[in-house]
C-alpha cells in the first residue's frame, strides 16, 4: 500500500507556477508513515490524466490529486477520474448550497459554470473546502483503491488536508506510527564543521539525525517514528540534548524559533531595549527584528544611515573616522552603535556597515566586507569584521549581515 | 517528439526540498517550443528509476533528468539509465582531471567515491558542469531518443542548461520558433479590474496575453512565438502599447523592473534625494529601496520610529497629535514624513505608520489599517489611508505597506 501524488495543470508544465504542493504532501505522507514512491505532473488533458491514473494504479493504492477542480472547461480532474472508473458523475445539492452561500457573502451569484463543481462520482464523499469554493472528494472506487482530490491553491489544500484528509487516513489505519521531529537551528558554524562534531549521530537509526542548510543557517532534524508524541520525544530528547551540548552557543533555537524571535525572548526576560543603525542592510535588520509580533516591547527603532552625512548628522559619527578609516570600518561601526544607543536611549544597539556590492568593492575593502558593532547595556562597544565573499551576491550579503548582527547580540545577551 | 522531465531523489519525495527545477525546466521547454506533457519524480531506487524511464519512453523522446549524479551510493541516475539501455559505463579521464582541479582549488583531494562521477555510458557526451563537480551527459542511446542529465542543485543545473543544453537542442532543430515575451507590471489595481479593462485582449492568439498575480502585484505577460526576437516584438509591442495606454499610471514597469528600481530611475533623472520614516514596516521600506544596487545615489537613509518616543524625539512628531489622533493617523504619518525630510535634508520622503497585527487592532483601528505619508520636493505633505484587511497576515501587510509607499512616491514623481 503506497500513495502517489498526481498534480493536474498545464500551468505547472509551463512553469507558470512553482509546485509547492508536492513538497507539502511529501512531508505529510512521510509524517503519517505512508510510503510514497512517485509524483506525477500532467496537463489539463482528459486522456493524459486517465493514462496517469492507469499507470499510478499499477503501483500505488492511494491516489492524491491536486488541481483541476475549478469551473472552467480546462478543469477536468473529477471528470477524468469518473471516466476512468466508468462511474457517472452526480450533482450534489449540498455543494451548490455551500457555493451559493459563499458567493452571497461577497455579493456575487453562482455562474452557470460553477454548477460543474458540484459534480462528483456516484459513491464518492465530499471533502469540504472551508476557504474556497471547489470541494474535493474521498472515494474508494474499488477495493484497495483510495482517491483524494484537492484544489491546486496551496492554502485551501493545506486546510482540507489537515481538517479532513488526515483524520480520514488515520481512520483507515494510517499514522498509527508517525514521524515526530525536532528541528535544531544553528548560526555561526558551517555545515561541514557541525557535521564533523556530530558525525557519530548520523549513523543512528532511531532517532535519525539529518542536516539541512539554507541561506547560511544550518539545521539538524532529529526524528523518530513512534506510536505517540510522548514516546517519540523520549527517544529524540537525549540526542537533542547531546547535540546542544556539543554545539554550545552555535545552537540558537529550534522549530519555529528565528534569530529575531530568540533575541526578542532574551530582551523581554531582561526587560531591556534595542535599537539599530544600518548602512548596507538599509533597514533589513530592523525589518527582521519587527517581523516578530510583539517586538514593540523591546525594539525602539533605529536609523538607516545609508549616506555618510546621515552617519554624521544623526548618529554623530566623526568626520575624522570616516575620512581616516572609511565608512566600512571598526571605528565607524562602533560609533554608529554608540550613536544610535544614545539617540534612542536603549540598553543595546546593533550597527551594520559593509559593502553589499556588486559595485563599490576595492582590493582593500572587497564586496562582502561587513562590520557589525554592538553597544551593550554596560556601555561597552565592540565590533566584529566579516568577509562574506562577493560570490554570494547583494541580497545574500545583506541577509547574512543582518543575521550576524542578531547573532552577535544573541551571544552577548546569553552571556550577560 | 515531446520532452519529459524526470527528477530523481528520495529527498524530493520526503518533501525535504522544494522542487524548483520543474518550474525552471518547464519554462525553458515552453520558450524553446518543445512540447512537454509529463513530469515525474522518483526516489533513489534503481528499479523504480528504470520503470520511470520505461514509462517515459512510451510517450516522450527527450528525457531530461535532474538529480542523482553525486558520489554516494544513493546517486544512481546514470547507472539506471545505462542499465536500462544495457550499455556499459566507462570512466572518462577528462572528468577525473576536471574534478581533481576543482578539488585542488579548495585544497582538497578526490575521495574514492568521486571516481564514480566520472562514469558515463559508452557513446554519451559529457555535459560540463562549470560550477560544481558532477557533470551531466547528453546521449542518444537509440534513434529518436535523447537523454540529458543534470545535477539537482538548481544553480548548477541552470548554468549547464543555458550554456550547453540550449545550444545542443537548437542544433537538433528545436527553438527555430521560440516564445518571446514581455512581462508588464502593475501596482494599485486589482486583477479583476485590470482584467475587465483588457478583457478583449485575452482572446488574442498572437500575441497571447495572460494575467498573473503575486503578493498584490498584477502582471500581464504578452508573448509571441516567432523565428526571431525582432519578429516577435513586432507582434508584441503594439499590444504592449495598447495595454500601457489603457492602464495609465497603474502600469509601472516591465520585465526586471521593481517599484524600487522604477522610483530609483525617476529620482536619478531628477537628481533628487529620498528618505523614509517607518513604523510598522520596521525597516522593510528602506530595505526594499536599497535592494537596488546604486541606490546610494538618491537614498540618504531613514528613521525606524517603532516606538512613539522615537517618533517624538527623533522625528519631531508632536505629543498632541499622538494623543489626539493616535500613532496610526493621517496627522502622525504627515508629521513623520515632514520630520525625516527635514532631519535628513532630502527632496522627498515616505512615511508609513500602521497596524500589522496580529495584535493591536481595535474596532476603530483594525489590523491592516495603514497610513502612507509623502513629503514632496515642493514641501507639500500628503497622506493616504489604506485598509489592507487583517486576513493577509503580518508579513503581507508589512510588504503591501512598503509597496504602497513606493507606489505613492512613483505616482508623484511621474506627475512632478
Image (cartoon, coloured by chain):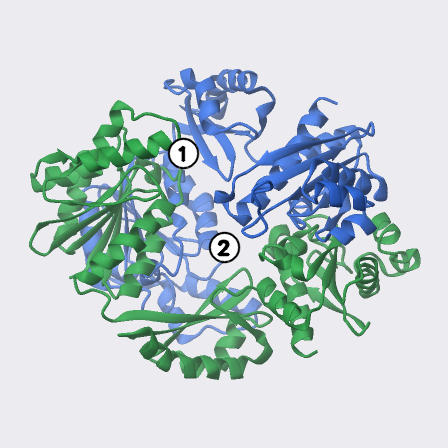
Chain colours: A green, B blue
Q: Is residue B209 visible?
A: yes
Which quarter of the figure is the N terminus of chain A placed in?
bottom left
Decide if residue B193 is on the left or right side of residue B145. right
| Residue at the spot 50% in from the left edge and 31% down from the top edge | B218
Location of residue B37 by image quarter: top left
Which quarter of the figure is the C terminus of chain A placed in?
bottom right
Q: Secondary structure at mark 2?
A: loop
Q: Chain of mark 1?
A: B
Q: Residue furthest right?
A: A320
Measure how far apart labels 1 and 2 are at the Cα level. 24 Å
Decide if residue A290 is on the left or right side of residue A254. right
Q: Is residue A215 above or below residue A306?
A: below
Tell me which numbered mark, 1 or 2, is placed earlier along the sequence: 1
Location of residue A85 by image quarter: top left
Q: Residues within 10 Å of mark 1 (few under 14, many from 20)?
A: some
Q: Which residue is mark 1?
A: B31
Q: Is residue A45 above or below residue A146?
A: above
Q: Residues within 10 Å of mark 2 (few under 14, many from 20)?
A: some
> Which numbered circle lies on residue B130?
2
* Front position among marks 1 and 2: 1
Q: Is residue A353 above or below residue B346?
A: below
Viewer-closest of B213 and B85 = B213
Q: In the rendering, at what x and y percent does residue B207 appear?
A: 42, 20
Q: Secondary structure at mark 1?
A: helix
Amino acid at each position: 500500500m503506497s500513495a502517489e501524488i498526481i498534480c493536474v495543470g498545464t500551468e505547472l508544465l509551463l512553469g507558470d507556477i512553482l509546485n509547492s504542493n508536492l513538497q507539502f504532501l511529501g512531508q505529510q505522507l512521510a509524517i503519517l508513515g505512508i510510503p510514497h514512491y512517485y509524483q506525477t505532473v500532467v496537463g489539463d488533458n482528459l486522456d493524459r490524466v486517465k493514462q496517469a491514473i492507469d499507470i499510478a494504479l499499477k503501483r500505488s493504492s492511494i491516489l492524491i490529486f491536486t488541481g483541476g477542480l475549478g469551473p472552467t472547461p480546462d478543469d477536468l480532474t473529477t471528470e477524468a477520474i469518473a471516466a476512468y472508473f466508468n462511474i457517472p458523475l452526480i450533482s450534489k445539492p449540498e455543494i451548490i448550497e455551500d457555493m451559493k452561500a459563499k458567493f452571497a457573502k461577497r455579493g456575487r451569484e453562482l455562474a452557470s459554470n460553477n454548477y460543474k463543481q458540484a459534480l462528483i462520482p456516484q459513491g464518492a464523499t465530499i471533502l469540504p473546502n472551508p476557504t474556497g469554493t471547489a470541494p474535493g472528494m474521498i472515494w474508494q472506487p474499488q477495493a484497495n483503491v483510495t482517491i483524494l482530490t484537492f484544489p491546486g491553491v496551496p492554502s485551501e489544500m493545506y486546510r482540507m488536508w489537515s481538517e479532513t484528509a488526515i483524520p480520514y487516513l488515520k481512520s483507515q489505519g494510517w499514522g498509527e506510527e508517525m514521524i515526530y521531529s525536532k528541528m535544531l537551528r544553528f548560526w555561526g558554524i558551517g555545515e561541514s564543521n557541525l557535521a564533523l562534531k556530530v558525525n557519530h549521530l548520523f549513523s543512528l537509526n532511531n532517532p535519525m539525525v539529518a542536516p539541512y542548510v539554507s541561506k547560511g543557517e544550518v539545521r539538524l532534524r532529529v526524528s523518530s517514528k513512534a506510536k505517540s508524541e510522548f514516546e517519540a520525544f523520549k527517544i529524540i530528547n537525549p540526542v537533542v540534548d547531546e547535540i546542544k551540548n556539543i554545539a554550545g552557543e552555535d545552537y540558537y533555537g529550534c522549530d519555529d524559533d528565528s534569530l529575531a524571535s530568540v533575541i526578542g525572548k532574551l530582551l523581554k526576560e531582561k526587560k531591556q531595549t534595542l535599537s539599530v543603525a544600518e548602512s548596507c542592510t538599509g533597514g533589513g535588520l530592523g525589518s527582521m527584528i519587527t517581523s516578530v509580533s510583539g517586538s514593540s516591547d523591546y525594539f525602539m527603532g533605529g536609523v538607516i544611515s545609508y549616506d555618510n552625512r546621515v552617519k554624521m548628522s544623526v548618529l554623530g559619527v566623526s568626520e575624522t573616522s570616516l575620512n581616516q578609516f572609511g565608512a566600512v570600518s571598526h571605528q565607524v561601526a562602533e560609533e554608529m552603535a554608540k550613536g544610535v544607543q544614545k539617540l534612542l536611549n536603549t540598553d543595546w544597539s546593533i550597527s551594520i556597515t559593509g559593502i553589499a556590492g556588486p559595485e563599490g568593492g576595492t582590493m582593500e575593502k572587497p564586496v562582502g566586507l561587513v562590520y557589525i558593532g554592538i553597544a551593550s547595556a554596560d556601555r561597552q562597544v565592540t565590533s566584529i569584521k566579516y568577509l562574506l565573499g562577493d560570490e554570494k551576491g547583494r541580497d545574500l550579503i545583506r541577509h547574512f549581515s543582518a543575521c550576524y548582527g542578531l547573532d552577535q547580540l544573541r551571544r552577548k545577551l546569553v552571556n550577560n
